[in-house]
Image: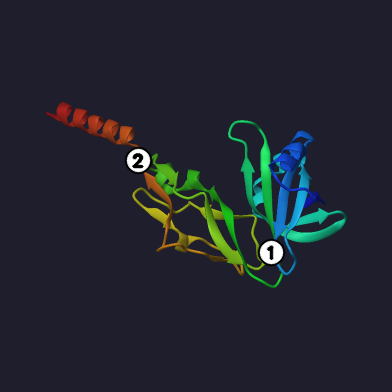
Amino acid sequence: MKVIAFKRELQGSGASRRLRISGQTPGIVYGGAEAPVLISLDHNALYHALKKEVFHSSILDLEIDGVSQQVLLRDFQVHAYKQLVLHADFQRVDSKQAIHVKVALHFINADVSPAVKLHGATISHVANEIEVSCLPGQLPEFINVDLSNIDVGHSLHVGDLVLPAGVTVVAHGDNLTIATASIPAGAVAAEAEAAAAVDADKK
């Protein structure tokens, strides 16, 4: 994805406020061998880009005054209640150096799993993203989590994920749980009542 930005010279809250009033969002680009650069971006374009999942987990082509460089979105701040992006941080990437990035998880095939198909279970997503390490050119837009074999009382863990070539999980702890399958408490109670009714009829 391509992002257009412009260098800005003025700093401080007053300058940033004037930028926002004019429809711009202040930002910064840092990392690599070059010094950090203060930038401004079109607010509406950035606001809509932030709604796209791919914008958060892709190498972006950031063009500053006609010169492009590859970056990652590293952070952004939004107003507490207004639809307003206050600031955006981008980090330069080197095609030969591994990066750590959080990537979204896409859960697929839940409807054909034994848990759902046979038992009417609910599958809970314990995590919606994971942190991975890879070269910039190998960064996946998302990672699929195949739920087709999950059954009631079972869980899927990080170790069960099928990762793209060159991608490894940056795990903060043991084999973390990604999804679990369980029958809702209401359904369990209903089944128990039905079973009790059947037993009563037999008597």
| Quarter of the rendering containing residue 192 | top left
Dot placed on the residue nearer the N-terminal end, 2 or 1: 1
Along the line of sight, the residue nearer the viewer: 126 or 199:
126
Instruction: State how the image is colored.
Output: rainbow
Is 194 left or right of 136, judged from the image as shown? left
Say what secondary structure mark 2 lies in: loop
Return the residue found at the far left: 203
From what the image shows, is residue 119 above or below residue 137? above
Q: Residue at x 72, y 59 (%)?
A: 71
Mark 2 or mark 1, whichever is nearer to me: 1
Is 125 left or right of 19, judged from the image as shown? left
Along the line of sight, the residue nearer the viewer: 129 or 70:
70
Q: Mark 2 is on which residue type?
A: Ile
Residue density around tag 2, few if under 14, some if 14–19, many if 20 or more, within 10 Å: some
Is 25 left or right of 203, judged from the image as shown? right
User: Residue 4 in the image: x percent, y percent?
Assistant: 81, 49
Picture disc at residue 176: none
For residue 104, say whether it is visible: yes
| Residue with the mark numbered 1 | 31
Residue density around tag 1, few if under 14, some if 14–19, many if 20 or more, within 10 Å: some
Is 170 left or right of 8, judged from the image as shown? left
Along the line of sight, the residue nearer the viewer: 146 or 66:
66
Q: Mark 1 is on which residue type?
A: Gly
User: Residue 105 in the image: x percent, y percent?
Assistant: 55, 52
User: Residue 200 in the image: x percent, y percent?
Assistant: 15, 28
Return the residue found at the far right: 66
Q: Quadrant of the C terminus?
A: top left
For residue 51, say whether it is visible: no
| Quarter of the rendering containing residue 116 | top left
Return the residue found at the far bottom: 96
Disc 2 to disc 1, C-alpha distance? 48 Å
| Residue with the mark numbered 2 | 183
